[in-house]
Amino acid sequence: MERQLPAGRPPRLVSSLGLGQRCSEVTLDQERGLLAWRHPRRGGENYFVPTSEIIAVEESELNKKQRNTGKWHKLAKPHSFTVYYVKKARNHRWWCRNVTFWCVDENLCNQWTQALKELLEMQKCRPKRLLVYINPYGGKRQGKRIYEQKVAPLFSLASISTDVVITEHANHAKDNLFEVNINKYDGVVCVGGDGMFSEVMHGLIGRMQKDSGIDQNNPKAPLVQCNIRIGIIPAGSTDCVCYSTVGISDPVTSALHIIVGDSQPLDVSSVHHNNTFLKYSVSLLGYGFYGDILKDSEKKRWMGPMRYDYSGFKTFLSHHYYEGTISFQPAKHTLGSPRDKDSCRTGCYICKESEQQLAEQQKKCGLKNEDEEEWKVIKGKFLAINAVNMSCACPRSPKGLSPAAHLADGSADLILVRKCSRFDFLRHLVRNTNQNDQFDFSFVDVYRVKSFQFTSKLSEDNGSNVADIGKKRFGQFCRDHPACCCNIADSTWNCDGETLDSSAIEVRVHCQLMKLFARGIEENYKDEAAYSHSSIEHLL
């Protein structure tokens, strides 16, 4: 995007400014949007900061130690300004750092301050007013403290005004989003875990469809995209969505992504049963193993986050499998595959090209003709059926359930884990935590799909019209007591950490339905010097 500089403003500003007790040549390249200086100490290291990652510029005063040292006695009163900027560190962490420049010439100081502030004003993608929802009960109940101590000061520094709502009950944020004047905000921020994000997402998408007259109960309805971005301040137990879209679960990093106005499109899957809308999903739809874990853990909320470990171990030992039929439409518009090594990164080429191809495909055929395309049907006994719109990475599983899943390519990765021995299933689970290929097993199949349907053989939904599959019911032998022939209760769908009422579902992926204050996962920077040099190389 070409920068339009203010009339009469030189494209390049170069001055010798004070930095600490010494002088440094400071350059502001306004055409390329780059602030550069050489540190007088630290071996004369060069610093390069894109103006898009400058948080704020303020007039400031030098501290007493600087004013009373050495040559200050011989100079007139110095004038100074402080630049607050993003410093990128290891593991995708961002810090807010600052540098103070000074000079004796007041006009020169004002010229620099004005030039930098004008460049910041040109960053039209930055939010000026935000609606903030804080869940005080999620995770370790630290949401309010995290926001007040780590996030609010940064928003204030960046001159962002906020309206803060402390949620008092489940669906408080969702219900509020249907009532509030959403057009006066540049974005919505949720402080909490994945559950809080899901609540805000459902509120925003639902509000957008309601205002546009779209019936969410129609599984084939083309949903209207949400133009209002969502920011996630992680304060939950896992924070999978934040980790998969930023690369780290850190409140300061997420706040800085919001401040600089980053935008990351995100696919959303709609889940229906019998032409009735159930939920939206952006991370995991899990049946069998992950559904059973969630169902069991809900009974043990008193244990806190530890309940997931307990229920996971218990579910693994039970080793239940479920018989059913799944049918899906392959995502032929996508460029990648679940088995390749092309992970989704900032400015992902695969997401951009896949979105364009899908748009062209829908323009030619239309959504109504999609059901006439090829469907594949698979029947079997499954330990787990997982559908993911993103990698689902988290600190415990750094590469996630599907490392090559893409955030915005209009598809989901469908992972089918067939009945196998307990030991083989353990091998598969362990590979979710290391660098080995978790799909490299004969009992694991993975497909990239744009829609799918599932019906369990044990489903009581005899009236389901989901592909007219699963009308016939029959029992399943208990794995641990094969002689008793007892029926095992049907499993539950885990939809982004919430249970679904029906096991027979119809799922459709909506390409780039919403946007986050994020930029996807960047390539790692080892240290500040590496960040500095890569920044200048990128801009040059």
Image (cartoon, helix red, strand yellow):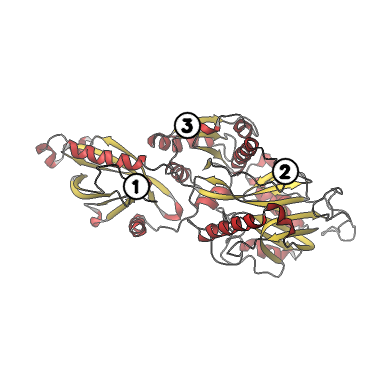
Q: Nearer the viewer, mark 1 or mark 3?
A: 1
| Residue 530 falls left or right of residue 299 | left
- Circle on res. 278: 2
Marks 1/2: CA distance?
A: 44 Å
Is the residue 484 above or below the residue 67 in the image? below
Q: Give the crowd class for mark 3: few <14, some 14-19, many >=20 residues within 10 Å.
A: some
The answer to which quarter of the image holds residue 529 is bottom left
Residue 135: x percent and y percent?
A: 57, 35
Which residue is drawn at the image coordinates 69% and 44% (left, top)?
A: 279
Q: Amino acid at mark 1?
A: Thr
Measured from the top left, where is residue 126 in percent x and y? 43, 41
Residue 167 position within the rendered picture, expressed as x and y whole percent measured from the top left: 59, 31
Q: Quadrant of residue 299?
A: top right
Q: Residues within 10 Å of mark 1 (few under 14, many from 20)?
A: many
Residue type, mark 3 in image:
Thr
- Mark 3 lies on a secondary structure that is strand
Q: Are marks 3 and 2 in contact (CB under 8 Å)?
A: no
Mark nearer the N terminus (1 vs 3): 1
Q: Is residue 180 above or below residue 387?
A: above
Which three-letter amino acid code belongs to the residue tagged 2?
Answer: Leu
Compare residues 191 and 434 and report the one nearer the observer.
191
Residue 366 appears in view: yes
Q: Label 3, label 2: how many angstroms apart (C-alpha)?
A: 32 Å
Rounded to the nearest whole Å, what is the CA distance between mark 1 and mark 3? 24 Å
Q: Which mark is drawn over residue 162?
A: 3
Quadrant of residue 159 in the image? top left
Q: Please identify the quadrant where the C terminus is shown.
A: bottom left
| Local SS, label 2 | strand
| Rendered position, 65 above or below 22 | above
Viewer-proximal residue, 141 or 345? 345
Which residue in the protein does label 1 denote?
51
